């Protein structure tokens, strides 16, 4: 092993090949799939940034993500889907690269294991990179972890201040990142591990809090000067009011989503133990001369467990949905926290490693707080956990005696299953393509925004038709009202939303829509041009077959009737309405 480490080829791989792969791998799908919801919705918020085209709730609750996204739109090609996918994909590249350097250089984890771990962590990133509020959250959280580690292990208080700044800044990337202040608990945990004096721990905590609250005050001050404190407070108030009608965002619902995931993982773990326990018992009961028989029995039980997991639907290999990786991802989270806990309470573990293990547990728990996606959002942020767990398991398998061979065999079985499934998921899964089981081999030929993007023929045909109509009618750049899970059209058609591009979101309240329509009417009375209205064709079909009333849609129809809107275009996917004073204006 040492001879391999000293070889020139290995050093080249560690210093150049591995980092290059980690930087390029997140960009593998930037030209595949057309998503009418999350991806283009976020890009629309980036391109048409500000309260004029975005509701205050969504603008301020993810303020820095919107600002960073807007900066990306100003870069070369930033008005196109391909280049925005490239720019946002680089955030994942940077995440993996920084994690790799930290683990391989500072923690001295073998570079090969660190690389494999980061490769797997990238592969299971199911969330579109357009959701910068997630990936910027991960990035600042990672920076916070590294700075806390460096500050405590090197006794440099300036790093603790900087860690606090990173965690405080994260509140303005996504307001629900407030619980990340809990990462400062690592200061106390390390103080206990090192038996520091209370005065020293309090001082270190104070430096972290200084950076945390200092950054909060600075960002809040800037926003207050730029937009007014009242506007920011009003937007955040709407965020809290939203939980009254959207139960998914209640604290209790989000915590339930987390714990229900762990409970589901516990179910599968208990079944695995059925296969594990007999092997453990036999390893202790059978005499020492039967070591090969012990190994064969343990391998048999491990293979049997793998077969049972597959046949029971635990792991899937279709990769059309993020759910295909969910169960194995949750079980890995449980394994990661268990391994970290063992390393913390082991007397042989170095203090520095105990600190990292504790912070990995905190990251695993905190990441999922503030999201209605349950543990899926935690599975999306395993850049530290996967490499560390692989290293810890590798070390365990090298040193554990024959009596623990059953544990070794079962853990290796699960990790092999997890790694194979993760890499398969990474190669095949594309978020924008998750609902398309047909070939993705068509392109839109009449749009600069969608140039170079492959999608289904149905989507390409429908987009070409509506783009041609909008071009002929000179509607590009005009404001639009979108309804029917098609907010991405604002970015794809280069038409800013009249007030918010995804008004059929459950979190966008009926009162918010009423207020926006009243404001629109006031602007129209002052001479503003009426916006275009576009619905998804599926929505119209659903209205004709479903008697359930959509109150927000009713308000839009009332507005359209008042101003004399008429259907002027339709195809298999979209229906477009115009008022009499729109179109054909220079």
Image (tube, helix red, strand yellow):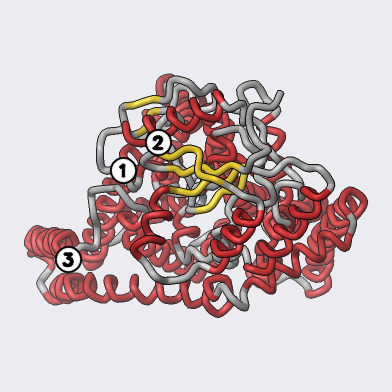
> In the image, residue 42 lies at what x, y percent?
59, 45
> In the image, residue 273 lies at what x, y percent?
23, 73
Mark 2 → mark 1, Cα distance in angstroms: 9 Å
User: Which element is circle 2 on?
Assistant: loop
> In the image, residue 226 lies at what x, y percent?
89, 48
Q: Which of 335 and 73 lies nearest the eye of the viewer?
A: 73
Residues marked 2 and 3 touching at CB (< 8 Å):
no
Q: Which of 370 and 477 lies nearest the eye of the viewer?
A: 477
Residue 312: mark:
3
Q: Does residue 286 appear to the left or right of 493 in the view shown?
A: left
Residue appearing at x 54%, y 34% in the figure: 492
Quarter of the rendering containing residue 548? bottom left
The residue beneath circle 1 is 436
Residues marked 2 and 1 touching at CB (< 8 Å):
yes
The residue beneath circle 2 is 33
Point out the tag, 2 or 1, that comes first from the N-terminus: 2
């Amino acid at each position: 092993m040492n001879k391999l480490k000293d070889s020139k080829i290995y050093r080249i791989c560690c210093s150049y090949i591995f980092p290059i792969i980690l930087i390029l791998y997140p960009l593998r799908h930037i030209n595949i799939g057309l998503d009418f919801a999350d991806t283009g919705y976020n890009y629309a918020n980036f391109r048409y940034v500000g309260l004029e085209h975005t509701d205050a709730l969504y603008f301020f609750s993810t303020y820095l993500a919107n600002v960073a996204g807007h900066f990306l739109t100003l870069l070369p090609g930033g008005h196109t889907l391909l280049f925005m996918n490239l720019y946002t994909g680089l955030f994942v590249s940077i995440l993996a690269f920084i994690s790799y350097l930290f683990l391989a250089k500072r923690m001295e984890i073998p570079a090969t294991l660190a690389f494999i771990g980061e490769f797997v962590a990238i592969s299971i990133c199911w969330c579109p990179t357009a959701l910068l509020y997630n990936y910027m959250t991960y990035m600042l959280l990672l920076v916070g972890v590294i700075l806390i580690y460096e500050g405590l292990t090197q006794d440099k208080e300036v790093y603790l201040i900087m860690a606090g700044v990173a965690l405080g800044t994260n509140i303005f990337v996504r307001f629900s990142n407030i619980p990340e202040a809990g990462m400062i608990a690592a200061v106390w945990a390390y103080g206990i591990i090192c038996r520091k004096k209370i005065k020293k721990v309090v001082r270190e905590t104070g430096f972290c809090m200084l950076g945390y609250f200092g950054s909060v005050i600075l960002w809040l001050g800037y926003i207050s000067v730029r937009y007014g404190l009242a506007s920011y407070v009003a937007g955040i108030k709407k965020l809290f009011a939203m939980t009254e009608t959207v139960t998914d965002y209640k604290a209790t619902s989000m915590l339930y989503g987390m714990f229900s995931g762990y409970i589901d993982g516990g179910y599968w773990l208990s079944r695995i133990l059925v296969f594990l326990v007999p092997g453990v018992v036999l390893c202790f009961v059978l005499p020492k001369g039967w070591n090969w028989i012990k190994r064969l029995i343990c391998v048999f039980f491990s293979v049997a467990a793998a077969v049972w997991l597959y046949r029971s639907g635990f792991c899937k290999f279709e990769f059309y949905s993020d759910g295909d990786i969910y169960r194995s991802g949750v079980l890995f989270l449980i394994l990661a926290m268990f391994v970290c806990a063992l390393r913390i309470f082991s007397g042989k573990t170095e203090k520095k490693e105990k600190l990292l293990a504790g912070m990995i547990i905190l990251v695993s728990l905190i990441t999922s707080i503030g999201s209605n996606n349950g543990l899926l959002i935690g599975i999306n942020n395993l850049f530290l956990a996967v490499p560390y767990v692989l290293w810890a398991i590798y070390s365990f398998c090298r040193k554990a005696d024959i009596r623990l061979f059953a544990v070794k065999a079962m853990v290796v079985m699960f990790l092999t299953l997890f790694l194979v499934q993760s890499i398969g998921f990474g190669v095949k899964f594309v978020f924008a393509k998750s609902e398309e089981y047909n070939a993705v081999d068509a392109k839109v030929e009449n749009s600069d925004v969608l140039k170079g993007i492959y999608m289904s023929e149905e989507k390409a045909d429908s987009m070409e038709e509506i783009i041609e109509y909008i071009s002929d009618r000179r509607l590009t750049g005009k404001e639009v009202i979108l309804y029917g899970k098609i907010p991405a059209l604002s970015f794809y058609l280069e038409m800013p939303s009249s007030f918010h591009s995804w008004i059929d979101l459950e979190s966008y309240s009926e009162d918010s829509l009423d207020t926006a329509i009243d404001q629109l009417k006031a602007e129209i009375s002052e001479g503003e041009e009426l916006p275009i209205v576009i619905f998804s064709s599926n929505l119209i079909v659903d209205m004709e077959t479903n008697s359930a009333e959509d109150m927000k849609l009713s308000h839009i129809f009332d507005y359209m009737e008042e101003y004399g809107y008429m259907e002027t275009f339709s195809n298999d996917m979209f229906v477009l309405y115009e008022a009499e004073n729109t179109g054909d204006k220079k």
